[in-house]
Amino acid sequence: MTKTPGKFEPPKPTTKAERAASKAFRQLDTKKAMTDHETAQKAFAANRERLKAERLEAAGTPVVAKKAKTKKAK
């Protein structure tokens, strides 16, 4: 069916099931995107630290290993 010029056609109302499905898929997409982002950030940080250590080693500065931060138990 083609639209005639100048005629307004209201959007089709979504059903409760369609809204629930949309919400579920949106949540899954969000989790996947956050996981991908965190993985990329960890890889970037590890590579940056490796390159920093190589640069310091080449300059003759002794490399000091950093301790991982630990969370305090309350």
Image: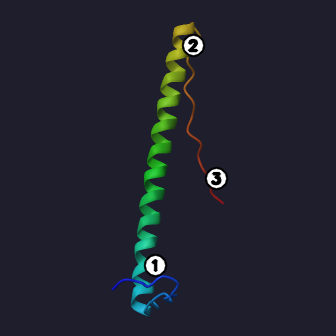
Tag nearer the camera, 3 or 2: 2
Q: Is residue 19 above or below residue 67?
A: below
- Residue 72: assigned label: 3
Task: Give the amino acid type for the residue marked by disc 3 in the picture.
Answer: Lys
- Residue 15: assigned label: none
**Label 2, label 1: how far apart the Cα atoms are:** 53 Å
Q: Position of residue 52 (x, y in %)?
A: 54, 22
What residue is drawn where x is 48% and y is 87%? 11
Q: Position of residue 62 (x, y in %)?
A: 57, 13
- Residue 23: assigned label: 1
Callout 3 touching callout 1 (CB < 8 Å) = no
What residue is drawn where x is 50% and y is 43%? 41
**Label 3, label 2: how far apart the Cα atoms are:** 30 Å
Quarter of the image with the N terminus is: bottom left
Callout 3 touching callout 2 (CB < 8 Å) = no
In primary-sequence order, the first of circles 2 and 1 is: 1
In the image, 49 versus 28, the foreground residue is: 28
What colour scheme was applied to this rendering of the protein? Answer: rainbow
In primary-sequence order, the first of circles 3 and 2 is: 2
Neighbor class of circle 3 (other Cα within 10 Å; few <14, some 14-19, many 20+) is few
Quarter of the image with the C terminus is: bottom right
**Label 3, label 1: how far apart the Cα atoms are:** 36 Å
Tag nearer the camera, 2 or 1: 1
Q: Is residue 16 above or below residue 62?
A: below
Callout 2 touching callout 1 (CB < 8 Å) = no
Residue under label 2, please give it: 62
In the image, 32 versus 67, the foreground residue is: 32
What residue is drawn where x is 46% and y is 71%? 27
In primary-sequence order, the first of circles 3 and 1 is: 1
What residue is drawn where x is 59% and y is 11%? 61
Q: Quadrant of residue 32?
A: bottom left
Neighbor class of circle 2 (other Cα within 10 Å; few <14, some 14-19, many 20+) is few
